[in-house]
Amino acid sequence: MQPVVVQLQEEKERAMKEVAEMKKYLAKREKEGDAAARIRLLQREVEKAKESERKMLESMISQTKQLEHTKIELEESKLEIRNLLAKPRAIAPTKPESQSQDEMGRLRNELRLATEAEEKNKKAMDDLAMTLKEVTTEMNRLKEKLSVAQADLDRVRAEADHSKSMWMTTEEKFQILVEEVDKLRMEADESATAWNAKEASLIDCMKISEEDITKLKQENSRLEEAQRSAKEESTRFRDIMKQAVNEATVVKEALEIARGENSLLKDLVSARENSLKTMKQDLERAKLNEATAMDSVKELQSRLSGEPPPASSIDDGTTAKPKALSRQGSEKRAIPVKFPSERWRSDHPHVQNGLRSAAADPGSISERVTTWSAKKDRTRSSLSCASDLTGSSHLGLHNGDDYPYLDEAGTNVGLPAKQRKKSQILHRFSELLRRGRLPK
């Protein structure tokens, strides 16, 4: 609002300057009115000069005519005088002397009158010449004065036209300024009204701001209390975090222990897998030995019964010695079969001293295979238990609430000491996580 008021003041000062210039121009116009009166006076003087010149020309023309008439009369008088002078000579012998004297006196009078008239004419001519000279001089002076007056008139007319154009321009500017002043006055009134409204709204805003400040102070005090409680909570949480860090360190140690156990379990699994591979190889060997033993048994049984051996078991070396083979077959009944696997130890219920007679128990190979299959199943069950234990140790790190041995009821009595310690650490860590998820 303040810049608008300053602008209005500047416009008002500019309008006042324009009005002052207009007053000066009007004063100049009044002076120009005096110049117009002077122009009219000069015009009247020019008209008077023209009238006097016309009259002087008429007078000069009349005097010229009179001078011409006088010259004519003078010439006539001169002719008459000459005639009169010549006439007495002609009439002298005839007329008496007295008449001639009277005639001479009359002629002298006429001559004197003619001479006087001629002198008067000369004087009149001189006066006329002087008058013409004066009239010419006066006419030249009046012409010069008229030219000067005409130049002044032209100059004054040009100035009047310029002044008129300036007056029209100034009148238009003045009208524009008047309209602008009216517009500025209206804008000033509107600005004043708007300013009053803004001032009222500003006062209302100040009142509202005071209320808001009071509310903000109350809110600030409440926030300060909340900040103090937050600081206390932060201190408590910092202590909890320190405890959690310590417990995390313990958990890391437990994780290291679990990793060691996992590596041991992996080694155990790899060893079991190696033993399983060895068992498979032993099983293959046992199957081969069983097949060989069965062939030997069948051959011996056929020989004991007196039947010829099958064609598949006879080659070029055996056809030459059938009796020797029968004897060797009878001897083989008493020879025990030696198994190459070291896993069939002497403590096995079906194996004694690593030897078994094939003829005494023809179904022992099948029983041995069944026993080995049961042992293989036990090995697989032990490996699955080990893998379950490893998976339980990994899952316990993520959620201690999924297993019953992590509860606070003390159900870890049947577990080893290391496993109980691990379960307690996991339970405390899960309790910390549960406490951290609680809303503040």
Image: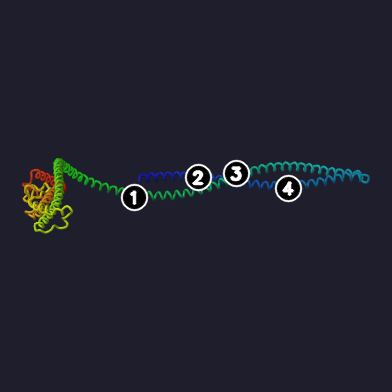
Q: Position of residue 315 (x, y in %)?
A: 17, 54
**Which residue has dot 3 on it?**
152
Helix, strand or loop at mark 2: helix
Q: For marks 4 and 3, give the one nearer the viewer.
A: 3
Mark 4 belongs to which amino acid? Ile
> Does 343 sit left or right of 178 as displayed?
left
Structural distance between the alpha carbons of marks 4 and 2: 52 Å
Q: Mark 1 or 4, which is nearer the eye?
A: 1
Residue 90 lies, in percent from the top left, at: 91, 45
Cβ–Cβ under 8 Å for marks 2 and 1: no
Q: CA distance from mark 3 to mark 2?
A: 21 Å
Badge 1 density bin: few <14, some 14–19, many ≥20, Cα 10 Å: some
* Residue at the disc numbered 4: 61
| SS type, badge 4 | helix
* Circle 3: residue type: Asp
Mark 1 residue type: Ala
| Lower sequence index among marks 3 and 1 | 3
The residue sitting at 35% across, 46% down in the picture is 1
Callouts 4 and 3 close, C-beta under 8 Å: no
**Front residue of this view, candidates 113 and 435:** 435
Q: Residue furthest front?
A: 320
Residue that label 2 marks: 25
Which residue is disc 1 drawn over? 194
Q: Nearer the viewer, mark 3 or mark 1?
A: 1
Of mark 3 and mark 2, the one earlier in the sequence is 2
